[in-house]
Image (cartoon, rainbow, N blue to C red):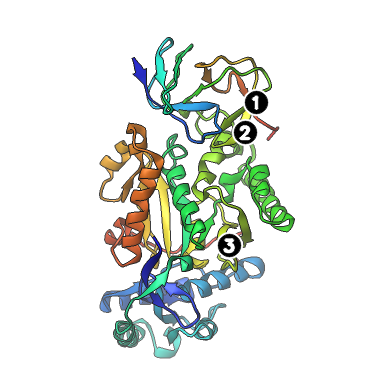
Amino acid sequence: MEQRVLIIDERDNVAVALEDISAGTEILLPDGRKIRSVSDIPYSHKVSLAALSAGDTVMKYGEAIGRAAADIEMGEWVHSHNLEPMEEM
Amino acid sequence: MDTFLGYERTNGSVGVRNHVAVIPTVACANGVVGLIAREAPGAVPLFHGHGCGRAGRDLELHVRTLTNLAKHPNVGAVLVVGLGCEVITAEFLASAIEESGKSVQSVVIQEEGGSLKSAAKGKGVALGLIESVGEQERAEIGIDRLVLGLECGGSDAFSGITANPAVGVVADRLVEKGGTVILTENTEMIGTSHILERRACTPDVAAEVKSMIQTAEQRTRDILGPFASMVIAPGNMDGGMSSIQEKSLGCIAKGGTSSIMQVVDYAGVPSSKGLVLMDAPGYDTESTAGLAASGAQVILFTTGQGNPMGFPLVPVIKIASTSRLYRSMEDDMDINAGAVLEGRSLSDVAESIIKLLCRVLGGELSKAEKNEQGGIACLYVTGPSF
């Protein structure tokens, strides 16, 4: 089953879930590529579009929104548990 | 989107409305302004709560805001209503307006002998001004003379995904065509200083961006103390915001991607075209008044939870972040950017905003105008009164 996500900027390596996506779901990207979710991704949360290593920059809006706090798989939920802010606020 | 039909003003600005504004110099004159506006249909009252009891920075701020609101391009003529003993006098305000070439007249309550006599005189003056501005016709104007104000209020988790990026596409389009876009609400820029500094056109402008956001962050911490994290930290983790950068990026997405050409003070009129930042807080009513005073002829206002407010002199266009909000408050919402969540592209929604914007510039009323959501002008204050 295909699930819709929104990619805001072409430089982004995360997309926004437009509905609750459960683990193991095939996700169709706007460019025709397909990825598979490896975790549950809640509505309006982020899913990784690529395999990221700890320390890699997470991009949304074409800008860095933080760094991967751990290795992140393609199709994995990205949130405060595996993303750390770019600088101490 | 190359031209629109507007009103040429003698000082070189262009209005998209031809209002006769009835402006109290001080809050004590609001009642008489109300009486006049009731008796002279078409006159637009600009109620506010200031004009006296302040000095220094706030007095300077309020003089600039009231003067620039009175000189607003959407205003064809002004009736100033003074009390007589206030700090910002009718004589002072009228002479500042006159310098801009705008037709202005004054009524002073203590000189006329009270509210009813002042209202009766004011009614006659206002009706005369309405008749005289009614003679001016719209002319074809290049879109490069448009100043677009941007605002968000009552945001939700989708504002930064649907409504704000769609408005950003509109902002970029206007900048490409030589127009001016004003992005404000510095509280919503905390955490993105490095990004906005990078986009500044010169190192000096970058330094001004940095200083404005640093001050906003410090002020937020000073006011909120231990609760500052409610603003400074991600607003709603349940909505999927994972960092302050992500939250603020969603807000500044309204400004699009162009270079930042200038930073202006609250209610300051930009001298540059292109994207300009204005130093105003996140509080919707105060930043909207600041945008109007800085000469924005129209404001695009995104909302997630649903905010119906407009502004007396300026058409405000409401852009809903979700279809759910659009449907529940359709009387107040002009555009449904929530369609992005159902598969419509951002550029498609931006195209709808541009089409409506062009119609509103030409005279079609936005929903906030139809619903008479002008309310009162809330002027920014930095300290207590005496």
Q: Considering only vertical position in the picture, is B94 above or below B242?
A: below
Element type where label 3 sits in the image: loop
Element type where label 2 sits in the image: strand
The answer as to whether the residues below labels 3 and 2 share one chain is no
Report if the CB atoms under discs 1 and 2 are less than 8 Å apart: yes
Q: Position of residue A67 (x, y in %)?
A: 65, 25
Report if the CB atoms under discs 3 and 2 are less than 8 Å apart: no
Q: Tell me the kind of residue under disc 3.
A: Tyr
Q: Tell me the kind of residue under disc 1.
A: Arg
Residues under labels 1 and 3: Cα distance?
35 Å
Tell me which corner region of the image, top left, top right, bottom left or bottom right, holds residue B20: bottom left
The answer as to whether the residues below labels 1 and 2 share one chain is yes
Q: Tell me the kind of residue under disc 2.
A: Ala
Residues under labels 3 and 2: Cα distance?
29 Å
Element type where label 1 sits in the image: strand
Tell me which corner region of the image, top left, top right, bottom left or bottom right, holds residue B107: bottom left
Residues under labels 1 and 2: Cα distance?
8 Å
Q: Residues within 10 Å of mark 2 (few under 14, many from 20)?
A: many
Q: Closer to the observer: label 1 or label 3? A: 1
Q: Which residue is mark 2?
A: A64
**Residue lying at 43% horizontally and 21% vertically, measured from the top left:** A42
Q: Nearer the viewer, residue B283 or B318?
A: B318
**Which residue ends up furthest to the top in the rendered image?**
A24
Which subunit holds the residue at mark 1?
A
Q: Nearer the viewer, residue B380 or B268?
A: B268
Q: The C terminus of chain B lies in which quarter of the figure? A: bottom right
Which subunit holds the residue at mark 2?
A
Q: Which residue is mark 1?
A: A67
Report if the CB atoms under discs 1 and 3 are less than 8 Å apart: no
Residue B286 seen in the current view: no
Q: The N terminus of chain B lies in which quarter of the figure? A: bottom left
Q: Considering only vertical position in the picture, is B210 above or below B250?
A: below
